Image (cartoon, helix red, strand yellow):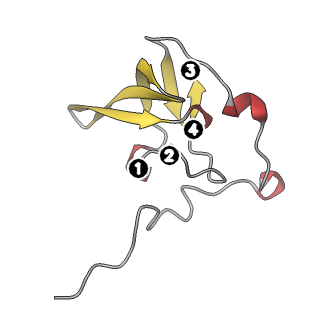
Amino acid sequence: MTQRAGGFRRKSRHKLRKNKALRGFVRIKDYLRGFKEGDKVYLKAEPAIQKGMYFPRFHNKVGKVIKKQGKCYKVEIKDGSKPKMIIVHPIHLRSV
């Protein structure tokens, strides 16, 4: 049996694309952003930084910050009707 080709960012060419003018540009403010427990956050991936990125299925979802874990945050989102916990770096989060 052959192995399925593809990895973490498979079929995400349009989803994880930046505006042409902003390619390679990352603000330090976004990298060091802080959130409190209970804050509502919006999952918006920063394609230039892969560290702490969530699975692309959860792109554009809204979740709630549960707690901080190291430099990242534990965020609870709803995937269909199931609540799921993901660990995300703050560069991939926006406040709602």
* Type of amino acid under label 1: Phe
- Point out which mark residue 25 bears: none
* Type of amino acid under label 2: Met
Instruction: List the residue tagged with mark 4.
Output: 92
* Type of amino acid under label 3: Val
Crowd around label 2: few <14 · some 14–19 · many ≥20 (10 Å): many
- Point out which mark residue 53 bears: 2
Q: Residue at x 75, y 28 (%)?
A: 29
> Distance of mark 4 from mark 3, alpha carbons?
13 Å
Spot occupied by residue 40 in the image (x, y as percentages of width and height): 48, 18
Instruction: List the residue tagged with mark 1.
Output: 55
Spot occupied by residue 16 in the image (x, y as percentages of width and height): 57, 55
Q: Residue furthest bottom?
A: 1
Q: Earlier in the sequence, mark 1 or mark 3?
A: 1
Q: Residue at x 49, y 62 (%)?
A: 12
Disc 2 is placed on an element classified as loop
Residue 60 versus residue 63 in the image, above or below: below
- Whether the residues at callouts 2 and 4 have beta carbons within 8 Å, the answer is yes
Q: Quadrant of the C terminus?
A: top right
Instruction: List the residue tagged with mark 3.
Output: 96
